[in-house]
Image: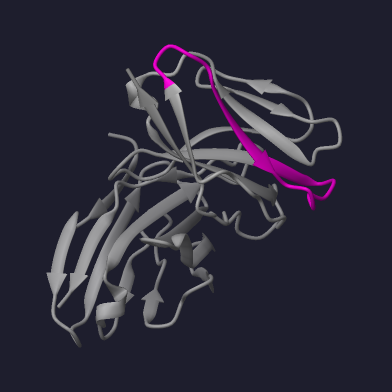
């Protein structure tokens, strides 16, 4: 699985868009980008994933650059409840073996009033 | 209720004792995982299972044993607990479909004294 690089921490004002970057310059053609988050004292929560097209769901948007070497998770209107550690993970989907996830240290997003 | 549950939520045990952490999911997901989370290390995979009676080692399997006699249960046993196994343990499951997001339990905080 490709290695990812994320900033250790970011701040965002409540109501503003939070843009969380992730670099994955060694990503392979069949590797997807996944985002999870972990709110304090809880288990990680799946947010979104994509291969090369931009994706949007009820939680967030995922923007992947054309060369796929980086991506950005966008929380359009951050709230205090979005304060969490956000993990960017790159892996092949459905390899035929267990779909294990390799977590890095993530970005700690602090949403403030 | 559907979901993934871990028990106990908190456990204190003594060095050398055997302890088993339980994980139960109600979705009949094929894949299940055990992670541990320590400060400075993020989430690390201990063991995973692709189906009942199929298990494999992850990144940090030493000192742990797993079994999967039923699809819905994936217990993790520390055969002889050590202080270095003090950690928060998370269980997760995923379905073997194209939508492979993982669902995590609330975690078990284990302290070995």
- Residue A71 within the magenta-colored segment of the rendering: no
Span highlighted in magenta in the image: A13-33
Nearest the eye: A63 or B8:
A63
Residue B39 x, y percent position in the rendering:
36, 61
In this figure, which colouring scheme has been used for the structure? Answer: one colour
Q: Position of residue A14 (x, y in %)?
A: 39, 16
Magenta span has A27? yes
Tell me the residue at 78%/49% (across/down): A27
Is A98 on the left-hand or right-hand side of A47?
right
Quarter of the image where the C terminus of chain B is located: bottom left
| Horizontal arrangement in the rendering, residue B7 relative to residue A60 (left or right) | left
B39 over A68 or under it: above or below? below
The answer to which of A45 and A78 lies nearer the viewer is A78
Name the image quarter holding residue A34.
top right
x and y percentages locating residue A12 in the rendered image: 45, 24
Residue found 20% across the figure and 88% down from its top: B16
């Amino acid at each position: 699985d490709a290695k990812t690089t994320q900033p250790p921490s970011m701040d965002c004002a409540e109501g503003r868009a939070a843009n969380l970057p992730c670099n994955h310059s060694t990503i392979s053609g069949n590797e997807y980008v996944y985002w999870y988050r972990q709110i304090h004292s809880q288990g990680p929560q799946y947010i979104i994933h994509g291969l090369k097209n931009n994706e949007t769901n009820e939680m967030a948007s995922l923007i992947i650059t054309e060369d796929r070497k980086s991506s950005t998770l966008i929380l359009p209107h951050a709230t205090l409840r979005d304060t969490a550690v956000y993990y960017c993970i790159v892996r092949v989907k459905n390899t035929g073996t267990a779909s294990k996830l390799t977590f890095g240290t993530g970005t700690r997003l602090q949403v403030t009033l | 209720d559907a979901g993934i549950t871990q028990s106990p939520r908190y456990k204190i045990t003594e060095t050398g004792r055997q302890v088993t952490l339980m994980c139960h999911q109600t979705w009949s997901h094929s894949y299940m995982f055990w992670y541990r989370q320590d400060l400075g290390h993020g989430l690390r995979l201990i063991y995973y299972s692709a189906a009942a009676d199929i298990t494999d080692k992850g990144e940090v399997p030493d000192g742990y044993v797993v079994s999967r006699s039923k699809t819905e249960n994936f217990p993790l046993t520390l055969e002889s607990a050590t202080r270095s196994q003090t950690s928060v343990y998370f269980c997760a499951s995923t379905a073997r479909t194209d939508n492979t997001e993982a669902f995590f339990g609330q975690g078990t905080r284990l302290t070995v004294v």
